[in-house]
């Protein structure tokens, strides 16, 4: 049995795309750079990549990255680990983090919009962020397809 992501017949030559789309590997490499930047802006723990996967899955489904957030805020707990516990962020720190993260996810969204949803799905599956993104896409976004 296959899922919606695997059972499509997609002809890259027939897809009308613009600007930077040249091939899935180049697009995946570009995507990796942007997603690495998003990962580095977080706390870089073992769960960070899962949060990226949730947002990517939503984008793969044609939704916004925020629709895929698995926490109330993009970063879970608004604070900084000091070694002895979390130091809460100020409202200004939260606003700054939100603005920076939004700019980075807008780059991913523009890439998806530029190359199209199907080519974006292929780029994600060719990226190093594939595992969680594909699993969440299948589990949460294709159930009603």
Image (cartoon, rainbow, N blue to C red):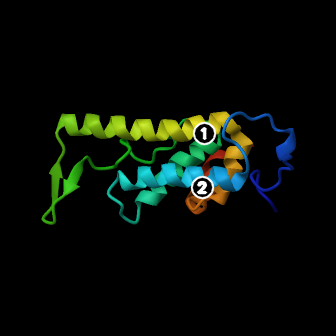
- Residue 138 seen in the figure: no
Q: Nearer the viewer, residue 71 or 108?
A: 108
- Residue 47 seen in the figure: yes
Q: Position of residue 134 (x, y in %)?
A: 63, 56
Q: Is residue 48 left or right of residue 12?
A: left
Q: Nearer the viewer, residue 18 or 60?
A: 18
Q: Residue drawn at (83%, 50%), measured in percent from left and top?
A: 8
Disc 2: which residue: 29
Image quadrant for the N terminus?
A: bottom right
> What label does residue 85 carry, if any?
none
Q: Residue drawn at (46%, 44%), measured in percent from left and top?
A: 69
Q: Secondary structure at mark 2?
A: helix
Q: Position of residue 6 (x, y in %)?
A: 78, 56
Q: CA distance from mark 1 to mark 2?
A: 12 Å
10 Å crowding of disc 1: few (<14), some (14-19), many (20+): many
The correct choice, above or below, for 104 with respect to 79 in the image is: above
Q: Is residue 58 left or right of residue 36?
A: right
10 Å crowding of disc 2: few (<14), some (14-19), many (20+): some
Disc 1: which residue: 111
Q: Give the total number of marks visible in the rendering.
A: 2
Image quadrant for the C terminus?
A: top right
């Amino acid at each position: 049995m296959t899922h919606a992501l695997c059972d499509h017949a997609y002809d890259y030559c027939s897809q009308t795309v613009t600007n930077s789309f040249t091939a899935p590997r180049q697009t995946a490499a570009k995507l990796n750079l942007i997603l690495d930047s998003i990962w580095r802006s977080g706390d870089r723990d073992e769960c960070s990549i899962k949060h990226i996967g949730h947002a990517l899955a939503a984008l793969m489904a044609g939704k916004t990255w925020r629709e895929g957030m698995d926490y109330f805020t993009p970063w879970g707990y608004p604070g900084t680990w000091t070694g002895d516990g979390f130091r809460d962020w100020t409202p200004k720190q939260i606003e700054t983090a939100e603005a920076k993260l939004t700019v980075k996810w807008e780059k991913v969204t523009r890439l998806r919009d530029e190359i199209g949803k199907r080519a974006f799905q292929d780029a994600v599956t060719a990226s190093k962020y594939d595992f969680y993104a594909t699993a969440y896409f299948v589990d949460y976004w294709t159930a009603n397809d």
